[in-house]
Amino acid sequence: MKPSVLVTRAIYADVVDRLSQYFDVDSNQEDLVLDAAALKARLAGKAGVLANAADKIDGAVVAALPQLRAVCNMAVGYNNLDVPALTAAGVVATNTPDVLTETTADFGWALLMATARRVTESEHYLRAGKWKRWSYDMLVGMDVYGSTLGILGMGRIGQALARRAAGFGMNVLYHNRSQLPAETERALNARYVSKAELLAQTDHLLLVLPYSPESHHAIGAAELAAMKPTATLINLARGGIVDDAALAAALRNGQIFAAGLDVFEGEPSVHPDLLTVPNVVLTPHIASASEKTRRAMANLAADNLIAALDAGPKAGHPPSVINPEVMARRR
Ligand code: DGY
């Protein structure tokens, strides 16, 4: 008998077909949002799950599902998973790094440009019929070329963002848990600074650090007050890294110039104050959403699930494991 797996949300039909070669697949192709109770109920008796970043798989879920052996996120971020609980229970956890790096960095750049140059605000202005004549100060923004880019979190995506800055003649500063090797810094033309220096000197601050209890509200009222009034802030990482209420107040008070947000605390809800300030560009968590990348993410998540459940050509060797000690214990 084939093991049973759950695919928690709709994905590409050919990926479901591929999983079906190895498993009995319960696939939520109706794309219903499964709350915690529904997720637990549908996971009962399943050996694995292809999940997404909104599926919270915490200690209570893990404890209720003793047959679960693999949780494969279709996302690089995995703050939705209680990894220590999964590891303790012998459940392999995987994510989808690398395949989304460049697409996410492209989008970070799109959000940065739209924010600094007021692209969405300009479009709303035009659509509302307010454009009656040219004027020297109409919708003026902040320069990107030649300015200082700050990156908080210098992992794969942070580095891809830094590489793009070369074309804009930017001075690149970064802060990270650990400093990059000198050779990498040279290649990226990026300088390591303290978080305080980053906040004080940056013209455009990109957030690409992982969410954890330590990074919760890494940007709050105090950090926003430390930024230049001409600065922009872009959150590509996760909701909760920015205190959205404090950000809305800082945008309204002109404490910073503008923000671009792809992720939100409590998404898909958005803090109501962010919906009423004009100087913020809002997008619904789409940084990795290109056709090619989303397919690559789905396929990598499927490869991980197949291999983690000891099937397919990579049986026992899932390509991107978060807790490799679990696979090692199984061998
Ligand atoms: C990721 O891969 O972590 C993206 O944010 C999509 O959830």
Image (cartoon, grey):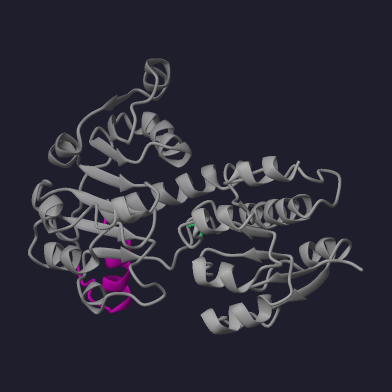
- Residue 51 screen position, x and y as percent: 61, 65
Q: Is residue 122 visible?
A: no
- Residue 40 screen position, x and y as percent: 60, 78
- Residue 170 screen position, x and y as percent: 29, 31
Query: Which residue is at 71% across, 67% downward?
Result: 67
| In the rendered image, the vertical position of residue 305 relative to residue 199, given as above or below | below
| In the rendered image, the vertical position of residue 297 relative to residue 247, given as above or below | above
- Quarter holding the C terminus is top right
Residue sticking out furthest to the right: 1
Query: Which residue is at 37% across, 46% downward?
Result: 209
- Residue 118 screen position, x and y as percent: 26, 59
- 162 inside magenta stretch: no
- Quarter holding the N terminus is bottom right
Query: Which residue is at 10% across, 53% downward?
Result: 222
- Looking at the image, residue 96 sits to the left or right of residue 188; the answer is right
Residue placed most toward the observer, 280 or 58: 58
- Looking at the image, residue 94 sits to the left or right of residue 22; the answer is left
Q: Quadrant of residue 62?
A: bottom right
Q: Is residue 165 visible?
A: yes
Residue placed most toward the observer, 215 or 138: 215
| In the rendered image, the vertical position of residue 304 relative to residue 262, given as above or below | above
Numbered-mark total: 0
Start and end of the magenta stretch?
A: 117-133
- Looking at the image, residue 188 sits to the left or right of residue 297; the answer is left
